[in-house]
Amino acid sequence: MQFIKTIAVSAALAATAGFAHADETLDAVKEKGFVQCGVSQGLPGFSNPDDQGNWTGLDVDFCRAMAAAVFNDADAVKFTPLSAKVRFTALTSGEIDVLSRNTTWTMSRDSDFGEFVGVNYYDGQGFMVPKSLGVSSAMELDGAAVCTNTGTTTELNVADFFRANKMNYTVVAFEKADEVVAAYDAGRCDVYTTDRSGLAAQRTKLSAPDDHVVLPEIISKEPLGPLVRHGDNQWGDIARWTLNCMINAEEMGVTSANAADMASSANPGIKRLMGTEGDLGGKIGLGNDFCANIIASVGNYGESYDRNVGPDTPLKLDRGVNALWSQGGILYAAPQR
Amino acid sequence: MAMDNSTGYSGVVNSGDLPDKPAPIKTDGVGPWIRDNLFNGAFNSILTISSLLLVLYTLPSALNWLIFNAVWTGGSDACRANPDGACWTFVTSRWEQFLYGFYEKSERWRIDILLVILAVGIAWLAWERTPGKKLMAFFMLVIYPIFAFFMMYGNEAMGLPIVETPQWGGFTLTLVIALSGIVASLPIGIVLALGRRSEMRIISLLCTIFIEFWRGIPLVAVLFMATIMFPLFLPAGVTFDQLLRAVIGVALFASAYMAEVVRGGLQAIPKGQYEGAMALGLPFWKMMRLIILPQALKIVIPGIVNTFIGLFKDTTLVLIIALFDLLGIVQASIADPNWSIKSVPYTGYAFVAIVFWICCYSMALYSRYIEDKLHTGHKR
């Protein structure tokens, strides 16, 4: 009956003027009992359904971590798969509470659509070419036919890159990644360009993956991160510190396996992280053990990375710049104190 | 011979046997059939040979890929080892997902029951010698949709946990959208067609505007507007079920087409039928129900089924508004990195094509059967 009630209420309210809600997301989420999280419609390693129909991936893990932070239950989350075009509308209209959908953090998006709370994957656009082309640098691609997706920033980045370097190119653009790969594999273009994580994922679909090489140039910055609606600072803080908690946990060596033991650690930093000291969780409207719950049920950032996109997965992505700052990467979370 | 002469008969008499005539050209059997149908003339012979070559050129490799060289058992590793054949294990390992989408696992029996009732109901209505057709039709068209809604969505009072519509998916969702569209579009279409032909100016104008509006915009635009623009008109925090929006959009879109198909049938009924009905003193609705519509709808069965089939295939467009119908769920599954293999996307799309073809062809077969059954004077 709730379904019909919703319809009736929507119809009634549709006639009246809308007004903005602020500082209410946490209450609303607690009341309905789950976090509504927007993810992609299927991006290998970031959000895709597995054999059992459960959503898995790096972006999905962030959603589960938020559920763990609020409810101490990583399954108290519902996923709304969104296409690239409808993702921001879904967020601003309130259909979802948080958007965790490999979304590049840009200034215009940050001001127009929502508040980015951090970066959970540093990506960048790269090029893949067949080894037989004999090219070792993107600067040698003058006159190439470039396969890419339509409607994303990748197409614009290619245009910028070739124009800046005064080179000519032809675009062969497709709607879906599968089509792009098929076209590239069939030799309809010389170069395949997309985010480097995407190149890794699609490479496994080529007839002879080893005959292709990813060029060293990275022509764009694609910091991918989750975002929430503007105007609700508390909910934004919860999302931000969910992400920071996972990164800090990796830095301090707290994993899902040792979380229970670490709770009794004497290290003051770990104590604050696990909430056995201080009242950090209370400041954002959560329990003090919110971070401990995230680590226990979802794991730290490194665990999530290894499970979804790391070297042991079919994607085989090295940590690269996504390693911790202390290990040569640029992953750096503000301290929890 | 002597008798002929004695009676004075002066006709020409052949002496000896006539030469043998050539045997008549054989007209039955395989050989003559081939000659008459496939090689009667140079142009047709060329066509036959080139079609034959085309089939010989494509069929073996298609069958090889689909069947003989395909991977039928094992996991993703088996497919990775054999990239040049269809990877059917991808389908078999996920068929539940393709059928139910993300529907709660413990509640899937509810869909099973609905599917069984649906199959029995359709068979009941389709088979000629079953009793109680009217009662069954009423049940399937009126009670079943309501029952199906409560079964699928759930009802706490009935002890069925709620399963939100975003969790509906797969082939079930395709059926939900297509069947609601089909069941809604025929009556709405008939009313619109009658309205457009009405002599009441305002009604006729309104129906024309409605039909031309919905017919004039692409379905993709309808779905986009329903998904993207509609929420912006609502106050923040108020949501309107996404699936319902899509179903309403699809149904209205299909009824505009249906209206024009039905109107075509109405145009074909001679004026004498109307006048005869009116002379009998039948009021408007009785005239329509008893005289005009039975004839008009019979004429346009091919058009109606054409619209149904089009509608059934159009349901795949809902994947752009993030509803996972059969095609959507297959595409999402292709993104699983564990199945990131060359043959998997092709297999997925081939599977979807086969399922859709079976559904659409059954509809076509049934319509042909109905046409044969009802033909009274119009059939050639």
Image (cartoon, helix red, strand yellow):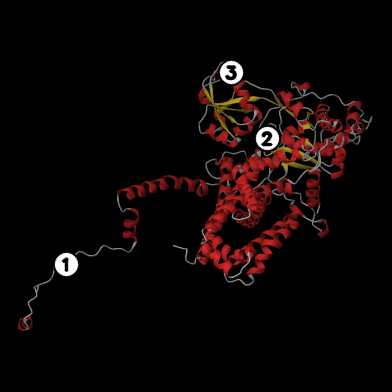
Query: Would residue B74 be visible to someone looking at this image?
Result: no
Relative placement, left or right, of A20 versus B332 is right
Tell which subunit mark 2 falls on: A
Query: At which x and y percent is residue A12?
Result: 80, 46
Mark 2: secondary structure: loop
Frontmost residue, B342 versus B290: B290
User: Is residue A139 or residue A246 the one in the foreground?
Assistant: A139
Residue B79: x percent and y percent? 58, 43
Task: Say the numbered circle drawn on residue B20.
Answer: 1
Discs 2, 1 touching: Cβ within 8 Å: no
Q: Which tag is nearer the camera, tag 2 or tag 1?
A: 2
Q: Residues within 10 Å of mark 3 (few under 14, many from 20)?
A: few
Q: Amino acid at mark 3?
A: Arg
Looking at the rendered structure, the kind of residue marked 2 is: Lys
Relative to residue A67, is residue B95 depicted above or below?
Answer: below
Q: Is residue A170 above or below residue B226?
A: above
Say which residue appears at 62% left-offset and 42% top-offset: B220
Q: Which of the marked residues, 2 or 3, is nearer the chain's N terminus?
A: 2
Classify mark 3: helix, strand or loop: helix
Position of the N terminus of chain A by quadrant = bottom right
Q: Residue furthest right?
A: A278
Q: Nearer the viewer, mark 1 or mark 3?
A: 3
Which amino acid type corresponds to the residue marked 1 in the rendered image? Answer: Asp
How far is mark 2 from mark 3, CA to CA? 27 Å
Residue under label 3, please give it.
Answer: A163
Q: Which residue is under mark 2?
A: A85
Quadrant in the rendering for residue A194: top right
Residue drawn at x 60%, y 23% is A158
Which x, y percent locates residue A170?
A: 53, 25
Q: Nearer the viewer, residue A131 or B308?
A: B308
